[in-house]
Amino acid sequence: MHEDIVRAPKAYPSVSVPNTNIDHRRVKSLLPYFQRHFEAHSAASTASDPYRPGDIVFMDTFRNRSGAEHVGIVSDQRNAAGVPLIINNWTDGTVTSDMDLLGWGVPVTHRFRVPALTSEAGPNPPRASDGGPNPAGASQAGPTPPRSNDAGPIPAHVTQLVVVLTADFADWRAGVQRYERKPGAPFRRVGSPVLAVLGGAGYGWGDGLHGRGAPAGRQGPLKREGDLRSPAGVFALGTVHGYAASAGSLRLPYRQATADQRCVDDPGSAFYNQIVSVTETGERWRSAEHMLRDDALYELALDIEHNRSPVTPGDGSCIFAHVWSGPDVPVTGCTAFAKRDLRSLLEWLKPRAAVWVALPRAEYLALRAEWGLP
């Protein structure tokens, strides 16, 4: 964990100066480590994704504070109602034991699972070059440098990449290439590149798995609310929102849009960068996007998890991959595709398996070895 903090300090906003004696004992530094390197699962236990012994859970034990401040492991022991106990270190006597935290109603905010071990490749396997991404006529960059299985902001469990490249920060036309790998193996190109359009001002460094803003040693504009820039960096992927009643052939989590759903982009709201119901919140915002629109732009809209940990008002909100109006029409800050290309991409994506890499070409090449990019 200390090595990861040193390697990617911006991914750990709670750590101002790395400290090997205490950082690994603090929940706010543990959480980003698990987000970067372990399989994320639904916080709640569901029929399709139940709690399993060994799952790591982060909990909100102080009701007067928001967010996780406690961590434990799901036990193989259960209470009388069949709810798993949680192995944790409690302040009452500082005793590590199985406790009925879930039965007491302690909320779980995040859940992770150690990926299954694979014998397909040993540590740091040799890398075979596949030429790197070449969307929209980009020049080939030569052989890819050797990489670690766990490099930069790409979590080790990730098996799919969506790489969105532009000519430079100001360019709003992008080429998009998919990549896939088996655990521990190199990424390989999947399919042919497709076109996409960005915000009319191009890219600005965002807040994601790479940290907040520009990586160490790199320059470029920063993403801000209303600046017509799409966020650059590495980002997790969330829910698909759409007009249809069901997900159809999609495997990602799906949520049907309703007339009262809004994505709040008013920096003065407590619901900034959240999709909420007007009816449930009772709030009125200076600015909020309708998720059920009069056009087809959000017929399919994939949530790109920018500015989420924690949410910073004014740093940009409501970032989606959605349907475009056309190849010559930029958007306000998202990434937009032809409908057929977006559906093909969404049908390919697997839950908790992919990340979004959005960069100008020069930044991609500069960060390629450090981040382990294909």
Image: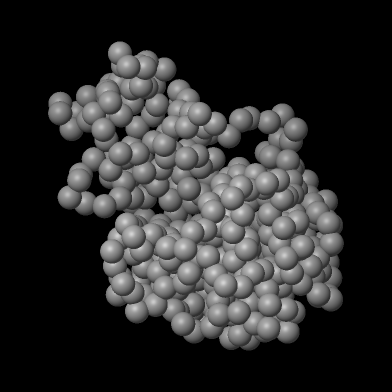
Of the pair 107 and 368, the residue shown nearer to us: 107
Question: Which residue is rendered at x = 49% and y = 51% of the image?
Answer: 4
Q: Is residue 35 above or below residue 86?
A: below
Question: Which residue is rendered at x = 45% and y = 79% of the image?
Answer: 224
Query: Quarter-wise, where is residue 194 in the image?
Result: bottom right
Question: Which residue is rendered at x = 50% and y = 39% of the image?
Answer: 41
Image location of residue 341, percent across then percent down? 76, 63
Image location of residue 260, percent across then percent down? 42, 63
Of the pair 106 and 92, the residue shown nearer to us: 106
Image side of residue 78 versus residue 50, left or right: left
Of the pair 159 and 29, the residue shown nearer to us: 159
Residue at the limit of the structure toward the left, as seen here: 92
On-image quarter of the C terminus: bottom right
Query: Quarter-wise, where is residue 234 in the image?
Result: bottom right
Question: Which residue is rendered at x = 60% and y = 79% of the image?
Answer: 331
Res. 193 in view: yes
Res. 17 in view: no
Query: Quarter-wise, where is residue 265 in the image?
Result: bottom left
